Amino acid sequence: MSSTTQYVFDQDRVFAVTPEAVYGGPIAGGLSRDAVAKKLNAGDDPASVIGNAAATGRSRIARKHIRSIHWIEDAGFLVVKQSWLWDPIRFQFTDSKRGREAFEGLCQELAPERPVKSGRIGMHDLPVDPKVAIGCLFAFLGVATVVCGAVDALPGNAKVKGGAVAEALADFGRSLGPEAAFGVGGLGILAAVALLAVWFAKRPAMEFVRVR
């Protein structure tokens, strides 16, 4: 590999660009910044200094596969995307000035003649907050259990089985009856749609360049 690796550190993470690919993720355990810099300056594969990148997305994207580069100022995220079927590299900068410099440098490296455009983030640009995802899942399961409890009160339907919480929700659904329970389910769906609409309207702004 060529020794022309460009890289930038941010806390315990490293973002690197080589003639072949773009890399981003946490520094592998046991390595210091000095050790990482020495390896990268010597032309070592950046993948060898990056640890588990599950929290920040993919750790490597070949340059020929990169579709677009995004800079989300409010969140401090530099996002490098390929096909929508694959997770992008999401690299968060604690210093927004350094993040913008990395974004502009990458744009100049990969698409010097392409204009920088402005827009709003999409659903897949920022990592999902696990607490929000888990909360949405339990809210859905709760509404579903209430509705199922009401439905299984009808003749010929089996009783909902599960833990104490599930059975309590099912009992609540039975006490409401099918019509009221479906009303609760409908209100839950409407609330979810309303929250999604609010999020969509207030999405953070971003700058981006389409590489291809």
Image (cartoon, rainbow, N blue to C red):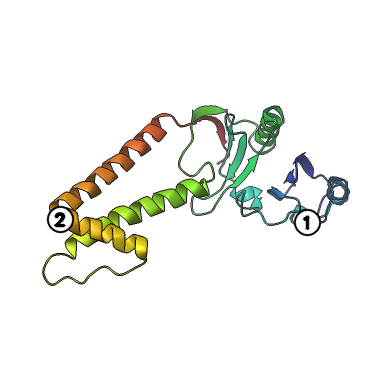
> Residue sitting at 50 percent across and 30 percent down?
204
Q: Answer with mark 1 or mark 2, whichever residue precedes in sequence.
A: 1
Residue 188 rendering spot, x and y as whole percentages: 28, 45
Quadrant where the C terminus sits is top right
- Residue type indicated by callout 1: Gly
Q: Which residue is mark 1?
A: 29
Residue 147 rendering spot, x and y as whole percentages: 23, 56
Measured in 3D between alpha carbons, the distance from the residue under mark 1 to the one under mark 2, in whole angstroms, is 56 Å
- Residue type indicated by callout 2: Gly
Q: Does 76 sit left or right of 105 as displayed? A: left
| Residue 210, quarter of picture | top right
Quadrant where the N terminus sits is bottom right
SS for dot 2: loop
Residue 74 rendering spot, x and y as whole percentages: 57, 29
> Residue sitting at 23 percent across and 70 percent down?
159
* Nearer to us in this view, 46 or 139: 139
Q: Which residue is mark 2?
A: 177
Residue 73 rendering spot, x and y as whole percentages: 59, 29
* Nearer to us in this view, 141 or 29: 141
Q: Does 205 sit left or right of 36 as displayed? A: left
